[in-house]
């Protein structure tokens, strides 16, 4: 028993350790977000609904077949078919009906409705793809924010490690009388400030991880973390392209533009369908019905008697005629009545719209207004895309220049710091000036990290408009 318990505990611990050790790459984050995002699932349901609408459109070409039956009881005063007298009785009847109708011509509305249904399916696909693009962009931004926070924390810890060494060296210099005790206090204050910066950086990293986890709809914040990857600054020639070239390339594949173009095509089909309602419609129909009675019936017995019908005037001789003696029998067999009482009807029906309170013509006008609205929206979306491309292009180039400038500033600050450190170690610089030199290096390193990730994200946005996927850094 103890062995089994130990084995189960070992498996559970191994499983939990494996779960906690999972590191998320950008690609896995995007794939998970696209699979679990609620808006994506809702839009996928819209796509399924569009498929159902297409099935409706296909059904408009098929015949409409209806079957019906009824059974009735008539209670009260009814004619007795045997005696011909009115009597209080109960009679029963069963009837069956069947009909088939098909549209021969309906102003081409059925054809255009089917084409519209196909366009609607395509529009929903573009809408879903555009939503996935936006989600991927948001995930990439959140992922880079985690990487930025992590590197910012590493920089803060590295700075603190250097300060600890300086603090140790300063204590020795104070002990030897090279520098005054006030310099030691300055270094200690710097170390305390850097400890606070580490705490803030750890908090920022934790918040960025939580924010990305929430974007992925993951609630296990403690065990969620991104992969430890060797991040290398990307090299890209996309910023060398002109904004016009990037814009024209984006027009060929951007799902939001294709979605707007498809909406224009849908609006055009709506106009055609509305105009079809102004044309005559022709339909063909066929109907069949039969009736079953459960009443007793009067039938001949095969025996005859003579019934007087008059006399011969000259001889006064009676004139008689044979008449079959009738008897009462039960209802005729079910299927005999089915074929005996059935009937057929068929024909064509032509409907010509003459006046319907302006509803059909107003429907055409509303469809035309909506068509103009979708065309305007398409133009607006193209303008928005053009502005977004130019903005992304300018932001990317400016971010790269800032990144280069921050790198040069960091190198200069490091050299100045090394020089200040040498002077401080020999007592030629006081602790305050040395602490200021170190603070300037800290700020330069923080700015360098910030500009690096700012450039990376803006570059990814620009590449996104050029058709490069976001699933890799």
Image: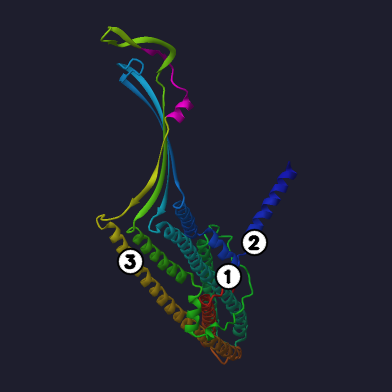
Lower position in the chain sequence, tag 1 or tag 3:
3
* Residue 391 relative to residue 6: left or right: left
Task: Say whether marks 3 and 2 touch (CB < 8 Å).
Answer: no
Mark 1 element type: loop
Q: Is residue 162 visible?
A: yes
Which label sits on residue 21? 2
Q: Which residues are magenta?
A: 321-340
Lower position in the chain sequence, tag 3 or tag 2:
2
- Please tell me how crowded label 3 is: few (under 14), some (14-19), or many (20+) other residues with Cα within 10 Å: some
Q: 186 or 368: which is nearer to us?
A: 368
Who's the residue at 26% across and 9% down the image?
Answer: 314
* Residue 15 relative to residue 125: left or right: right
Q: Is residue 431 visible?
A: no
Magenta-span inclusion, residue 197: no
Who's the residue at 43% across and 70% down the image?
Answer: 261
Residue pointed to by mark 1:
471
Q: Position of residue 84 (x, y in %)?
A: 32, 17
Measured in 3D between alpha carbons, the distance from the residue under mark 2 to the one under mark 1, in whole angstroms, is: 21 Å
Between disc 3 and disc 2, the foreground one is 3
Q: Is residue 105 above or below residue 432?
A: above
């Amino acid at each position: 028993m103890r062995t089994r318990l130990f084995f189960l505990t070992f498996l559970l611990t191994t499983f939990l350790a494996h779960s906690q050790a999972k590191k998320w790459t950008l690609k896995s984050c995007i794939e998970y977000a696209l699979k679990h995002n609620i808006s994506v699932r809702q839009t996928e349901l819209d796509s399924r609904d569009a498929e159902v609408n297409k099935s409706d459109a296909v059904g408009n070409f098929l015949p409409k077949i209806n079957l019906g039956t009824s059974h009735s009881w008539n209670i009260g005063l009814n004619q007795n078919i045997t005696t011909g007298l009115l009597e209080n009785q109960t009679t029963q009847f069963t009837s069956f009906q069947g009909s088939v109708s098909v549209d021969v011509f309906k102003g081409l509305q059925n054809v255009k409705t089917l084409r519209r249904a196909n366009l609607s399916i395509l529009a929903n696909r573009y809408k879903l793809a555009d939503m996935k693009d936006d989600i991927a962009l948001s995930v990439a931004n959140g992922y880079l924010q985690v990487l930025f926070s992590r590197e910012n924390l590493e920089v803060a810890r590295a700075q603190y490690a250097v300060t600890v060494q300086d603090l140790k060296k300063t204590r020795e210099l104070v002990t030897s009388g090279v520098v005054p005790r006030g310099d030691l206090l300055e270094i200690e204050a710097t170390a305390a400030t850097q400890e606070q910066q580490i705490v803030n950086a750890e908090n920022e990293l934790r918040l960025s991880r939580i924010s990305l986890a929430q974007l992925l709809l993951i609630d296990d914040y403690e065990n969620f973390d991104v992969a430890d990857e060797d991040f290398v600054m990307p090299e890209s020639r996309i910023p060398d392209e002109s904004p016009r070239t990037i814009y024209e390339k984006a027009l060929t594949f951007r799902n939001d533009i294709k979605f707007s173009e498809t909406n224009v095509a849908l609006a055009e089909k709506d106009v055609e369908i509305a105009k079809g309602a102004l044309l005559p419609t022709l339909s063909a129909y066929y109907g069949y019905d039969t009736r079953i009675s459960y009443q007793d019936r009067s039938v001949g017995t095969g025996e005859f008697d003579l019934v007087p019908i008059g006399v011969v005037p000259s001889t006064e001789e009676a004139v008689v005629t044979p008449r079959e003696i009738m008897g009462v029998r039960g209802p005729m067999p079910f299927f005999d009545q089915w074929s005996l009482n059935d009937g057929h009807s068929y024909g064509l029906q032509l409907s010509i719209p003459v006046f319907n309170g302006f509803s059909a013509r107003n429907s055409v006008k509303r469809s035309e207004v909506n068509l103009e609205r979708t065309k305007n929206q398409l133009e607006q979306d193209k303008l928005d895309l053009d502005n977004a491309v130019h903005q992304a292009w300018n932001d990317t180039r400016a971010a790269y220049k800032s990144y280069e400038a921050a790198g040069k500033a960091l190198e200069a600050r490091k050299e100045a710091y090394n020089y200040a450190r040498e002077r401080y170690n020999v007592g030629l610089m006081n602790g305050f000036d040395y602490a200021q030199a170190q603070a300037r290096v800290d700020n330069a390193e923080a700015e360098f990290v910030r500009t690096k990730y700012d450039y990376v994200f803006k570059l990814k946005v620009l590449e996104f408009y050029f058709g490069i996927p976001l699933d890799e850094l």
